[in-house]
Image: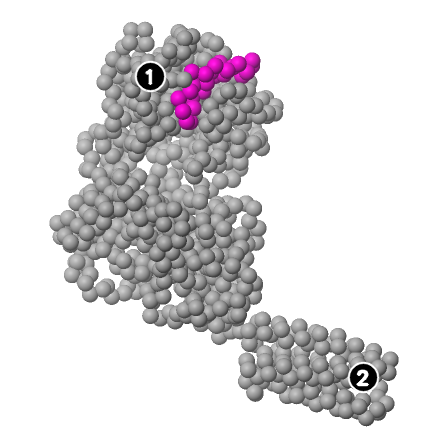
Amino acid sequence: MRKTQKKQIEDFLKLLNQVHEEIRKLLEDKNFASAMELLGQCQEGALGVGNLIENSEGKEASTIPLLESYCELTYRIYEELAGERDLSAGQIYKQLRRSGIQIENSVRNDIKVSYEIVFLPYKASMWDSMESVWQAADADSDCEAYVVPIPYYDRKPDGTLGEYHYEWDKFPDSVPITHYNAYSLRERRPDAVYIHNPYDYANYVTSIAPEFYSDQIKKYTDCLVYIPYYSTSGGMSEGQASCPAYYNADYIIIQAEKYRRFLDPALPREKLVPLGSPKFDRVLKMCANPPEPPAEWKEKLEGKTVYFYNTSLNGMLSDTEHFLEKMKYVFRCFEGRKDACLLWRPHPLMESTFDSMRREYKPRYDALKEAFIRAGIGIYDETPDIANTIALCDAYIGDSGTSIISLFGMAGKPQFILNNRISSEPEEEDWRGELLRGFPVINGIREGIPCVEQDSWMITQGNKLYRSVKNDGRFRHFCDVSDYAFGGYYGGPIWIDGKMYLHPIHAQDILQIGESGIKKRIRLESWVERPGAFYSAAVAGSYLFLIPNLYPFVVRYDTKKEELRYFEVETNVFSGLVNGERRCGAFGVKEGRLYLTSPTDRRVLVMEAESGECQVKEIRGGAAGGYMSMMFCPQDGDFWLLPYSGNVITRWNPDTEDVREYPVSPEGFVCRQIPFGYECSERPFGSVAFYRDEVYLSPFFGNQYIRLNKNTGEACEWKLPVELPKKEKNGYFTPWAGGYWNCLMEGNEIREYRLFSVYDRKYYRVDPEKNECREIPVTFDRAELRENEPGFAEQSQWLQYACLENAFNSLPDFLDGNITGNDFDRERQLAVYRQLSANSDGTSGEKIHQFIRKKL
């Protein structure tokens, strides 16, 4: 019997007890007519309950005779009252009560509840996120499990619903399908409903039918469960933190305990249930017993190493031009190989995403697809079950930002992560594009003044600290600063009172570096599970301030007392989302105050370094679109602020609050977004250098170096005495700006002007007076670089174990088995991935079903 039906009976029996009490009172008051009327209603209700039980449990149900006896009892009492016999109210009540208790006990103990559980998948290719839960429910004798695929629509470019899709015929033959028109949520009111689409109205590419949005489903069930359609290898995108269905679901299945912190903290903790991923159940099952491949695949697979090539939506949307060029390169690498088979499986929504969001590129994609199939380069896979395909493959190549990574990780198969900007094999010096991404930092010990004769340092090649003794430009490995191979965990170095520190970016600790390596690790409270906990760091006296990006506090480390303090400030002033992109504002220090500007408007948060007291000010007349960089000019005591949008530079004195604006737009000056190349008005300038009455501006997205006169406001292009490239050499030299300044100060004066050219990764000493530039040679020991190359390794907390495509490990290298660094270690990979999911032994679906059963 359905739980709702049994509850209906139990509620009736509770009401029956109340009616029995009322009958007793009526008899005591000699109100026989009313008592007889209630007896008739009791008999009528009992007959209804009997019919309900008989229809559900059959005529042999043990509760039926008890109900019949109760009906006979009420009839006899009714007849005796009609014959005006003098009856004892107490005796009648006892008889009715005794019969009612017998019925209650029988209903409670003899009628077993069956639960109706409904699964509402929308894409057959995502069925693996539900399958093992359905199998557990289907095998449960107390459950009736229904699989009811629901329709979805492509979205047109204007956001309205477009082409209708219904994939009922693409599910495995073993799954009995119920058409959505044949199952009424309103009428059946299932005990539990599982969904795997969290977006409702908020997806720009597709939409499930609006009648199946989560707020509509919730009207007809007491238990709505969301299971993610994806699995993760350690990270989650910011867009997954808050989806419409989360707020309507009763339970959200998460892969492991750590993923609570990825989701909106406003969600009740008890709603998030860490029970693993059914997707892992499916892939483990299939890899243990691989299926027979489709007949048309067999010849291409036979005797070859099979590489699963994944092209993801994130990879395509983030840089469509390079994505398409990458596809051509991958196809070239496999063309004609007798030892390797390329199995290409694009994301199931790839073509509809091209149609709705990248329509101008769709013909090129179609042409590549057609050429791949026509030339027989490999296998084009559009089968609905990805686990079957993974079981037939030997290795993964493709993007990192996809849940397929985690499936291959859990299956113990190697993963080679492609860089979509690389579309050629590396040349001899292309490693420079990956290693040289910022200025070396010169050791500033002499009375706190940077000194070019002392050592310089650079964090590069992942999380490795390199040192150039006496700043001779020859860098050698000093120490590793993290167990993870992928870079970006720390910034710096920074010197305070003769001590050297690395400040966290992705990490959540501060490192003090000693003579032979890490001297001390100052651990912070762990609050963030995504990359980008901090944006940068600033120094005020003996204080090291950590400027948060995703971290919820400004952190101050007192280097003298070795104490940490956390300040809860209005972080939304200087950090936030702009058109889906996370931005941080500019920051600077003056006279014991930390200034943090908004990336979106004229606000600035002013923080007293000593007390931590804060106030929010507004820069009068400043850039309405916020600031991306600021530089303090000691000669005039002003901050120079560079805009996120537009061409107006703001000169601001925080003491007097005086503002002067400089519109800067020399002839021929335009901005082109890097790396995509389209014209824009964003981020024109990157950094500032001061020389006498002139300000030198480096380009960020702009196309010119500019010289600005402080007094007159006149601006013109500054022609450097060396020809700097306007474009990167190749995909190994990923650009993010045109160039930037990094000047050494001595007191309030600039001792040395230094410039970094991003496109070719070259460093220059600049003499503004003589208008001269000399390249600063920077060299590494190539043999040492190869020795330190990680190969297959734990890359980060968000990409657990893989090998990255780079100048030392190209795609042909991987295909030929010529990996620089660690070879693939299956057991090491499995050990890492088992820590990422609860129930990683293939029992997630069973555990999810058991949990929901208990809640029902």
Is any atom of residue 269 visible in this view? yes
Q: What residue is shown with label 1?
A: 666
Instruction: Check the image and report above or below for 53 versus 784.
Output: below
> Residue 779 appears in which quarter of the rendering?
top left
Observer-nearest of 376 and 262: 376
Q: What residue is shown with label 2?
A: 33
Observer-nearest of 450 and 605: 605
Observer-nearest of 277 and 620: 620
Residue at 42%, 44% in the rendered image: 237
Circles 2, 1 touching at the beta carbon (< 8 Å): no
Mark 1 is on which residue type? Pro
Quarter of the figure that contains the C terminus: bottom right
Alpha-carbon distance for marks 2 and 1?
102 Å
**Which is the main secondary structure of the residues drawn in magenta?**
strand
Q: Specify whether 182 is left or right of 362.
A: right
Q: How many labels does the image show?
A: 2
User: What is the secondary structure assignment of the residue under circle 2?
Assistant: helix
Q: Earlier in the sequence, mark 2 or mark 1?
A: 2
User: What is the secondary structure assignment of the residue under circle 1?
Assistant: loop
Q: What stretch is highlighted in magenta?
A: 638-662
Q: Specify whether 571 is left or right of 314.
A: right
Q: Residues within 10 Å of mark 1 (few under 14, many from 20)?
A: some
Instruction: Check the image and report above or below for 705 versus 157.
Output: above
Mark 2 is on which residue type? Ala
Observer-nearest of 51 and 93: 51
Q: Where is residue 199 in the image (x, y as percent from the top left)?
A: 45, 52
Asked if residue 656 is among those painted magenta in the image, a careful observer would answer yes
Is any atom of residue 498 visible in this view? no
Q: How crowded is mark 2: few (under 14 residues within 10 Å), some or many (20 or more)?
A: some
Quarter of the figure that contains the N terminus: bottom right
Residue at 54%, 27% in the rendered image: 556
Q: Residue 422 carries which label?
A: none
